[in-house]
Amino acid sequence: MSLSPGDPESMGGYTLVDRLGSGGMGVVYLGLSESGRRVAVKVVHAPYAQDEEFRTRFRQEVAAARRVSGAFTAPVVDADPDAQQPWMATLYVPGRTLSDVVAKEGPLRGRALRVLALGLVEALTDIHRVGMVHRDLKPSNVLMAEDGPRVIDFGISYAVDNEALTVTGRLIGTPPFMSPEQFAAPREVTGASDVFSLGSLLVYAATGNRPFDGSSPYLTGYQVMYEAPELYGVDEPLRSIAERCLDKDPAARPGLDELRRLLRALPDSAAPVAPIAPLATAAEAPDSVEADTRMSRGRAVPPAPAVDGGTTETGGRRTGHGRRRRRVLVGIAVALAVTGVSIAAVRMGSDHDSASSSSSSSGEAGSTAPSPSASAPSASAPASAAKVTLPPKHVQWDYQIGGAYAPAAGVRVVGRDHDSEPAPGVYNICNINAFQAQEDEERDWAADLLLRDAKGNVVYDKDWGEAILDIRTAAKRQRIAAKLNTWIDECAARGYKAVEPDNYDVSTRFPTYLKADQAEALMKLLATHAHEKGLAVAQKNAVELVADRKSVGLDFAVAEECAEWNECGEFAEAFGGNVLVIEYTAKGMAQACSGWGSTLSVVRRDELVVPQGANGYVHQTC
């Protein structure tokens, strides 16, 4: 891809001619030396250059990469980790990443899979020979050159006799490709950890699916530590090899010499495969982390287990996208807490979990900024919005639906769950779960208002264990709205200025049962009532429905991960820039700040939006 406006023209004497890729922590450019030699120049994003711990990690990456040389690694040719904007140049390797190859061309088979497997074993042998552990072997860190793979990115590798950089309590890595010991004892990992990651990577290369793939980093981490890998579609002998690599006990995994002998048995030609239609699910994010590989490619996936005998379904563009949990998944959180770590792993590139999860807002005092005065509606707002107060544009804000706490100084907008009191002195948005029954509140709904399949079983959102509400008829929508409107009344009585009905995208996730016009019809009932109470109404996600915002009665937008999914522009245009953005990864935050930080309100939160002081808490602004 060509250079973008604002990209440097040179770095360290190398002329930058093209972008090779970008991630949450930096950009990789194609550079030319004065003699014309091509190099890959990794330039750290300016904000991270100010983080001394990050600088230490980058120096470590440069030192580690310089120590490793071999046919299947990319050697460092130049670097300046102490520059105002740190950079490193490695030999340019023409080729796409493994994640890109599998996403666009499907799983590897035959000789291609064999060459990959043996090449990666050789690369790990070179890495381990100099006393290093890579710790982040994953598809986006493998370049597919014509003569074999190249392992890149030593950003979180370290010498086995040195202390790992986990002193702040942040766990660094990419959950679907991490080993159990990286979660349980990150300072004690050995080369066996890379063998576990290799097993996960080879399963992905052979099937297009990860053996551990939860709907959040917490769930994925739990699977890695306690559950058997999903090896559906992995043929022998690779299946047996992968099972040994993925043993929870590091001592039970094969060493690299044994692994090399085992992998030589892989077939040199692909066996005929009956065509299997890929599962029509969407990619996520949150955490998981390599967005373009969440599609189930080339295999039939058994249905997810039902909750209480009900039916589950996922659909639409992004599985699990649409909202973040207002209550922490207690069982998973406790299970991981036993290990003494908290996951703050985030993406770089398409699946890189890395670096700082420290909050950029540490003040405890509530904001002294006055509440905004009544404002005229934006160009896209319905006429009824003239009676309500819209949130101020392009301000610091915080998203606290997982638990309330005092906003940091300078915050002018806060979103909270409807059970919480509004924060004093700021514009408050009240979040309600409008299209699904909260997991512990299902019995509060009449049985006939829960969506059911042809067999009469309740349909569940499998990611959260929540029953879907049946919005298919006008009569049922009226009854559902009557209950939800009591929550809206409570929001107004407590002093909130706006309401955010969550799960508006339900029809895109459950297209077998629900239609967009049904979701819009219920939302219109809620918006009409909210406006009568003097509350503005937010459209939460559902960019597919943004064209109907005026007729539905939506005044502004709350958009999760719109930078990561390249949707911020659509929301900004539709709502006249009155958009509150929530990102959950370093990659998404970097994209949001660079593309929309000067016009929209942007905050980065942790995936479970836990309150300040809880493990994993993240709050950052541009």
Image (spheres, rainbow, N blue to C red):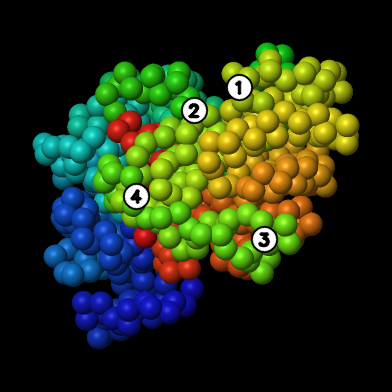
> What type is the residue that disc 4 sits on?
Ser
Which of pointers 2 and 3 indicates the residue nearer the eye?
3
Residue at horizontal 72 percent and vertical 14 percent from the top: 309
Residue at horizontal 21 percent and vertical 66 percent from the top: 86
Residue at horizontal 47 percent and vertical 39 percent from the top: 422
- Would you identify the image quadrant in which residue 377 lies? bottom right
SS label for mark 4 = loop
Q: Which residue is mark 2?
A: 327
Q: Quadrant of the C terminus?
A: bottom left
Q: CA distance from mark 4 to mark 1?
A: 33 Å
SS label for mark 1 = helix
Relative image position of residue 410 (x, y in whole percent)? 34, 55
Residue at horizontal 63 percent and vertical 20 percent from the top: 441
Q: Mark 1 and mark 4 in contact (Cβ < 8 Å)?
A: no
Q: Which circle marks residue 386 in the picture?
A: 3
- Would you identify the image quadrant in which residue 400 lies? top left
> What type is the residue that disc 3 sits on?
Ala
Relative image position of residue 229 (x, y in whole percent)? 49, 25
> What type is the residue that disc 1 sits on?
Glu
SS label for mark 2 = loop
Q: Which residue is mark 4?
A: 367
Q: In the rendered image of this protein, does residue 222 appear above or below residue 294?
A: above
Give the mark nearer the N terminus: 2 vs 4.
2
Between residues 15 and 379, which one lies in front from this camera angle? 379
Relative image position of residue 593 (x, y in whole percent)? 41, 63
Q: Which circle marks residue 165 in the picture?
A: none
Q: Mark 2 and mark 1 in contact (Cβ < 8 Å)?
A: yes
Which of pointers 2 and 4 indicates the residue nearer the eye?
4
SS label for mark 3 = helix
Is disc 2 surrounded by few (<14), some (14 to 19) or many (20+) residues within 10 Å?
Answer: some
Q: Which residue is mark 1?
A: 439
Which of pointers 3 and 4 indicates the residue nearer the eye?
3
